[in-house]
């Protein structure tokens, strides 16, 4: 029998350089902070350096583009193809990142880890992987949902009239389009609207945009306007040669706000095949013919989704010149729940912004005050939705967009339209309101030739006539010559004249 003291004893293997349980956790954590950093301490060093380098280049480039050209970021965010590709890339990157964390831990831990080290290491890797994997998957899903949302909002290959518009080139998408005319419609088909009546577009605003400067004029027509014409020779004009009317005055079924629902019902054969929204098509044709501006696209705004959109934007700031009712009905003498108080720079949430745009209880001019406030809401959204705000609230805005707006602008135009919106934000925005018995306009028997003249004067204001001084009376001594410079003019003689009908109605001017 051998002497126990002479039996060989087991010797714990020496630790390999760089391999220890603490190092495996430490470098796995480092790889969570910077992708691939942990792998640089393993036999996969080259893979780690490549992964880390790609991440740093993309991160630096992304920050630089965001700071120097936020418009480019927003343009990319408006492209469904870019968003879908980004969603796929983000998901793959997240999986590779999580894999690199696990590989770092396995490559650096002891070759024969103890039981507790396996358990603790496995739990740590699971937590660290989740830290990078879950945000990547959520981000990828958000990008994909946004891509789907944009495809749903914008028209695409449905045979509509906007498909295939060629307004310019890749470098200048508006080279052949000096003005873009967009019809903004406020839909009201919800809780208080009888099914038999259908959707009524109580808000009708035509935005005419100078694609070079972004300067925009908003033209508003009252919802009760009658005899809306249609383009000569069109099927709609043949059906209603005297405008949209049955020959009777003040029949609400033939007002402007009834076109959306009634024209497709009464004369579906007059709408081209393949049009996704026949009512919007009829309004584009009618308003375009009435104002002499061919309508390129429409945007239908759902008033219920409007609340969600404004809240996602963080609210809007407007000037309130007179108390605005929240709720209430003039017919039936139902008082408002409350009033929005007057004052400059009032910050409104979604609900208050909706009532600012819609409230008309007790107003002497009713719809016309409301029309003015609606234009101010449009102006506030355009001016205050800057790139930083949009990017900061991107997810909430993309979700709200699904519930608020539909348009026939093709998806391919989304990046160009978003870039144009930034010009509009920096440009001037004025309004022309057509009101009954004002400036010669009648909602019952409109003079459309006169209306078109007002439109042309607003988008092409006449140049001011040069000022000439009256000749001095005979015998008046001439002024002595002087080398002193003349006094500067009090106004720029080259400044465009502003027609009397174009006003800044959104300024603070308490009543």
Image: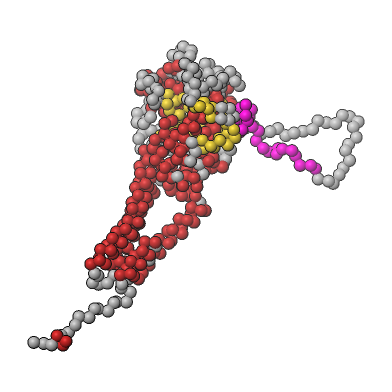
Residue 106: horizontal and vertical position, in percent?
A: 28, 67
Q: Is residue 36 visible?
A: no
Residue 278 visible in the shown view: yes
Q: Is residue 396 above or below residue 306?
A: below
Q: Nearer the viewer, residue 306 or 337?
A: 337
Residue found at the very far left of the displayed protein = 1
Most foreground residue, 31 or 29: 29
Q: From this view, report whether residue 461 is shown above or below residue 449.
A: below
- Is 487 drawn above or below residue 117 in the view shown? above
Horizontal side of 429 relative to 82 (left or right) equals right
78 sits to left or right of 445: left
Foreground residue among 36 and 242:
36
Q: Position of residue 467 (x, y in %)?
A: 75, 33
Work out whether 331 lies above or below 130: above
Report the quarter where the C terminus lies: top right
Question: Which segment did they paint magenta?
Answer: 486-511
208 lies left or right of 193: right
Q: Main secondary structure of the magenta part?
A: loop
Say which residue appears at 57% left-offset and 40% top-offset.
427
Q: Residue at x 30, y 66 (%)?
A: 105
Residue under the image location 35 percent in, 44 percent down = 145
Picture colour scheme: secondary structure
In front of the other: 224 or 308? 308
The x, y position of residue 129, in whole percent, is 32, 58
Count the marks: how many?
0
The image quadrant where one finds the N terminus is: bottom left
Magenta stretch contains residue 496:
yes
Rendering coords of residue 358 (x, y %): 49, 27
Residue at 87% x, 42% y is 481
**Is 236 part of what is drawn in magenta?**
no
């Amino acid at each position: 029998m051998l002497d126990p003291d002479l039996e060989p004893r087991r010797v714990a293997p020496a630790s390999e350089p760089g391999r220890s349980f603490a190092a495996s956790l430490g470098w796995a954590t480092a790889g969570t902070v910077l992708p691939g950093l942990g792998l640089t301490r393993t036999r996969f060093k080259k893979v780690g350096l490549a992964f880390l380098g790609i991440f740093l280049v993309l991160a630096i480039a992304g920050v630089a583009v965001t700071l120097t050209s936020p418009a480019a970021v927003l343009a990319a965010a408006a492209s469904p193809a870019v968003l879908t590709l980004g969603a796929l890339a983000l998901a793959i990157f997240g999986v590779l990142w999580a894999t690199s964390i696990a590989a770092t831990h396995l490559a650096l831990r002891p070759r024969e880890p103890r039981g507790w080290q396996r358990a603790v290491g496995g739990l740590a890797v699971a937590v660290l992987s989740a830290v990078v994997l879950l945000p990547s998957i959520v981000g990828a899903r958000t990008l994909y949902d946004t891509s789907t949302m944009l495809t749903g909002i914008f028209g695409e290959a449905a045979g509509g009239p906007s498909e295939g518009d060629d307004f310019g080139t890749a470098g200048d998408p508006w080279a052949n389009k000096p003005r873009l005319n967009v019809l903004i419609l406020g839909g009201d088909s919800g809780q208080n609207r009888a099914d038999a009546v259908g959707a009524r577009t109580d808000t009708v605003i035509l935005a005419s945009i100078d694609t070079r400067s972004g300067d925009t004029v908003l033209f508003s027509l009252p919802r009760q306007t009658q005899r809306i014409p249609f383009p000569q020779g069109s099927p709609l004009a043949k059906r209603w040669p005297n405008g949209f009317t049955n020959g009777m005055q003040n029949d609400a079924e033939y007002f402007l706000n009834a076109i959306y629902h009634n024209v497709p019902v009464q004369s579906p054969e007059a709408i081209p095949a393949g049009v996704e929204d026949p009512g919007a098509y009829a309004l584009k044709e009618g308003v375009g013919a009435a104002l002499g501006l061919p309508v390129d696209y429409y945007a239908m705004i759902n008033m219920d989704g409007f609340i969600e959109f404004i809240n996602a934007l963080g609210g809007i700031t407007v000037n309130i010149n007179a108390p605005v009712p929240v709720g209430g009905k003039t017919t039936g003498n139902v008082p408002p729940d409350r009033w929005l108080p007057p004052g400059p720079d009032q910050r409104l949430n979604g609900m208050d912004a909706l009532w600012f745009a819609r409230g008309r209880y007790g107003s002497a001019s009713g719809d016309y005050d409301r029309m003015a406030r609606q234009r101010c809401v449009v102006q506030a959204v355009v001016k205050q939705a800057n790139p930083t705000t949009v990017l900061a609230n991107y997810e909430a805005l993309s979700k709200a967009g699904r519930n608020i707006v539909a348009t026939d602008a093709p998806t391919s135009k989304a990046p160009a339209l978003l870039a144009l919106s930034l010009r509009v934000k920096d440009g001037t925005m004025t309004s022309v309101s057509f009101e009954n018995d004002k400036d010669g306009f009648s909602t019952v028997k409109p003079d459309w030739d006169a209306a078109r003249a007002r439109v042309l004067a607003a988008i092409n204001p006449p140049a001011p006539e040069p000022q000439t001084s009256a000749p001095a009376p005979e015998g008046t001594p001439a002024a002595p010559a002087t080398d002193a410079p003349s006094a500067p003019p009090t106004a720029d003689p080259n400044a465009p004249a502003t027609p009397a009908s174009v006003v800044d109605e959104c300024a603070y001017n308490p009543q």
